[in-house]
Image: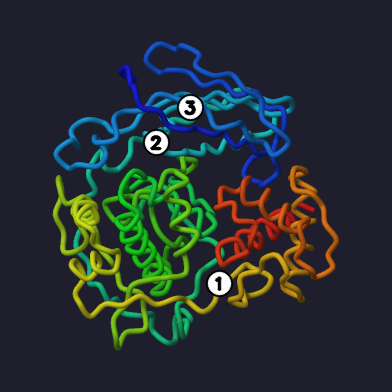
Amino acid sequence: MNPIYLDKGGLQVFVTAGETPRPIPGARVRVTDPSNGAVLEELTTDASGQTPFMELPAPPMEWSLLEGEADRRPYAVYNVTVSAGGFQTLHIGGVELMPAGRAVQRAALPEAGGFNVRNVLLPPHALWGEPSSRPPEEEVKPLPEPEGLVVLPEPVIPEYVVVHAGRPDDASAQNYWVPFKDYIKNVACSEIYSTWRTEAIKANVLAILSFTLNRVYTEWYRGKGYDFTVTSSTAFDQSYSHGRTIFEEIGTVVDDLFTTYVTREGISQPLFTQYCDGRRTQCQGLSQWGSQALAEQGWEATSILKKYYGSDIYLKSAEKVEGVPLSYGGEVLTLGSEGEAVRTVQSQLNRIAGNFPAIPKIPADGAFGPATQAAVTEFQKIFHLPQTGSVDFAAWYEISNVFVAVSKMS
């Protein structure tokens, strides 16, 4: 039930054909209040399958910023119903909205056939729902035996994370193949609030990244005979809710940091960075509420991490990212840039434009002119990146990832 709120937040619904990147234009989107069923907004999606951002009531900002206010739910919840010709109607309950922020709700419509309506209920946020109960683990794990699984010489950012939606021993739980960045965004949006200070968000994202990459690098579950990377159970791993609302403020931080992890001198693996809310549960690692309090005092992300994991930790970047056609060269591509990297971006954007016609097609001539800048800006708008019109680290990999995804649809 939503009380009467005076603050506002922005909500966009992004409608696609199933889990593919193919947008559905002209889909009908209805947002209702779960407390009384009142219709708050009725919109249709544009050529990119997206609604405009809708301004909807949200709780006061201080409820999500101060630990002492944590007994009041700091986000509003809404129901979203999406329908389109040739697809099943999708009802999503529990869509979250924070004050003064922008939330994006993906609606992956199943094709028509069988059931005509699909209902999805998203669980409460981890800081509001049941607290995690992860037992302590060693921060440096034993690696698989040489005669067993292959041990990578250096941590690699995987293309996908296989998420087991339940406890490890629950054979009935579904496995989801989730793109790595999407997994990190989902967990971060499930574990912390988007209204927190940017340095607190960075510290928590780095802890989530390191936790995940430790599971990947040590083949933690595969070494035990399971066929997945990580679970969604907070009794063992991190909170993951398939299809949950994603907050732009957190997504932007993940886009910038997704190849970075916490480690120490003398070890080859990302540190197993345990963390807990620091209010209802305590642990030998980062306190989520504590990190926000420190950020309010002006602490930077690295200093926050050193307080909880020790002064000898440092940040390191993985040198390889799987699933992208070419590695990023390090140079920001902008007006006046020339060369093969520009041509690659132009060619990839032209292929993406076949599915997202709002992106103008451009000559793949290797010269970064105004037309290329306009295409890059439109891509950044659709995929919720800062609209700079330049191609930096985050934009390069997002363009590459979307290019790979739409190419697989051909």
Tell me the crowding category of disc 1: few under 14, some 14 to 19, or many 20 or more residues within 10 angstroms, Cα based: some
Residue 170 vs residue 36, the one in the foreground: 36
In the image, is residue 7 above or below residue 349?
A: above
Q: CA distance from mark 3 to mark 1?
A: 37 Å
Q: Are marks 3 and 1 in contact (CB under 8 Å)?
A: no
Foreground mark, 2 or 1, reads 2
Residue at (23% x, 64% y) in the render: 304
Residue under label 1, please give it. 321
Q: Amino acid at mark 2?
A: Ala
Find numbered disc 1 in the image and state the secondary structure of the residue it sits on: loop
Q: Which mark is residue 55?
A: 3
Determine the residue positioned at 52% across, 68% down: 158
Residue 254 vertical position relative to residue 315 in the rendered view, above or below: above
Q: Going by the image, does 383 lie left or right of 144? A: right
Residue under circle 2? 100
Expressed as whole percent of the image width and height from the top left, the position of residue 175 reads 49, 51
Q: Amino acid at mark 1?
A: Val
Question: Is residue 134 visible from the viewing direction of this image?
Answer: no
Real-space CA distance between mark 3 and mark 2, rounded to the nearest whole angstrom: 10 Å
> What amino acid does circle 3 point to?
Glu
Q: Quadrant of the N terminus?
A: top left
Could one spot residue 186 in this view of the protein? yes
Query: Quadrant of residue 17 in the image?
Result: top right
